[in-house]
Image (cartoon, rainbow, N blue to C red):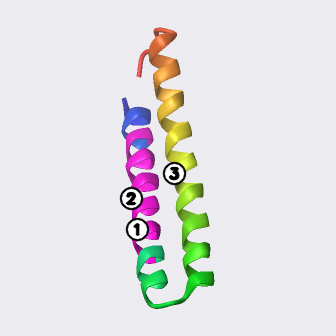
């Protein structure tokens, strides 16, 4: 069960980091710092991919009937 809590925390953390970086990208672009905004968007995309992979792994384990 401890592993499930760690996995859930990692998923929430990655999703939150993605949102934070997205918001920073919006702020940077409003200020005219488009290179900085691009950097934040790349970071956000990486975190989103990580969150998606974690979620996909959870779904696949569930589909295989593995216990958490």
Q: CA distance from mark 2 to mark 3?
A: 9 Å
Q: Which residues are magenta?
A: 7-24
Name the residue beneath numbered marker 2. Answer: 16
* Residue holding disc 3: 48
15 and 34: which one is in front?
A: 34
Residue 24 is situated, as x and y percent measured from the top left of the image, at 44, 76
Q: Main secondary structure of the magenta part?
A: helix
**Mark 2: few/some/many CA within 10 Å (<14, 14-19, 20+):** some
Q: Which mark is residue 20?
A: 1
Give the left or right position of residue 25, taking residue 34 as reference: left
Residue in the picture at 48% in, 82% down: 29
Seen at 38% across and 58% down, the residue is 16
Compared with residue 41, is residue 36 higher up or lower down, i.e. above or below? below
Q: Quadrant of residue 67?
A: top left
User: Quick check: can you spot residue 9?
Assistant: yes
The residue at 49%/45% (across/down) is 51
- Asked whether the beta carbons under mark 2 and mark 1 sit within 8 Å of each other, the answer is yes
Instruction: Pinpoint residue 54: horizontal percent, then vertical percent.
Output: 51, 38
Name the N-terminal-most of marks 2 and 3: 2
């Amino acid at each position: 069960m401890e592993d499930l809590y760690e996995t859930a925390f990692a998923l929430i953390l990655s999703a939150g980091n993605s949102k934070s970086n997205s918001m920073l990208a919006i702020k940077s672009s409003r200020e005219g710092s488009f290179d900085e905004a691009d950097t934040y968007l790349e970071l956000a995309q990486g975190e989103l991919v990580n969150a998606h992979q974690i979620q996909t792994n959870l779904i696949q384990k569930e589909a295989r009937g593995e216990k958490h």
